[in-house]
Image: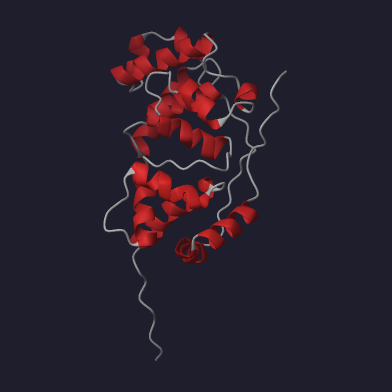
Amino acid sequence: MTAAAIPRGFDVAAARAHLQKRDRKLARWMQRIGPIEHDFAARFDPVDALARSIIHQQLSGKVVRVIEARVEALMPRRGRITPSGIEALDDASLRGAGISGNKLAALRDLAAKSRAGIVPTQARLDRMGDEELIERLTQVRGIGRWTVEMLLMFRLGRPDVLPVDDLGVRKGAQIVHGFDAMPAPRALREFGERWAPYRTLAGLYLWRVVEAASAPKVPAKRAR
């Protein structure tokens, strides 16, 4: 029997209410930051999404956008990175676009794993559990647990994912609860049980907490 598709996204209002009830300190930050909304309905191709994750590793800003655009331009279907597109290019072409040796090997492996059926189709993705997807996709060179967690959170809208290895999430937890240091991943995993089954939204807020805490304060205007 084919597994039923797992709905994308979750009831954000219910998630907010749950987090505010279970964690009063986080609730105060949530009130300060305001609602967080995200569109989980957008369709995407798994190979394209993972290829972009590989390209973005250890890069940011204008540089990664330029490299990404160069790779897109080399694809038969511009704007989408596909296994056939990767396979059709020689190493020199990808290196010329700015792809490093390690990332080139990762893209080649991604194409091969897609051909072998290890990387699921989009329809199959929606029928696989979180841990099953993590186990499957981390078989691809250059794809770690964190990368798959980002896909689960932002692309598939799974409600209960907490990326405990993420420095931003750990820093956010430290700020909210006044810890002396960032909690270790294992400690944060245990601590974060209070946010289940909506740990995804908790993680989104913890990232925002770090941004809000580091934002420069605007001095209040004095009345004349």
Which residue appears at 52% of the width and 18% of the height? 119
Quarter of the image for residue 62 reads top left
Q: Nearer the viewer, residue 162 or 42?
A: 162
Colour mapping used in the image: secondary structure
Name the side, left or right, on which 134 lies relative to 18. left
Picture layout, residue 210 above or below residue 139: below
Q: Nearer the viewer, residue 28 or 57?
A: 28
Q: How many marks?
A: 0
- Residue 66, x across and y down, in percent: 38, 31
- Residue 148, x across and y down, in percent: 47, 30
Specify the quadrant that holds the N terminus. Answer: top right
Q: Is residue 72 visible?
A: no
Question: Which residue extends farthest left?
Answer: 180
- Residue 38, x across and y down, in percent: 58, 47
Specify the quadrant that holds the C terminus. Answer: bottom left
Question: Which residue extends farthest right?
Answer: 1
Picture layout, residue 111 above or below residue 174: above
Which residue appears at 46% of the width and 17% of the height? 74
Q: Is residue 192 visible?
A: yes
Which residue appears at 45% of the width and 49% of the height? 192
Q: Nearer the viewer, residue 158 or 121?
A: 158
Picture layout, residue 130 above or below residue 118: below
- Residue 9, x across and y down, in percent: 63, 42
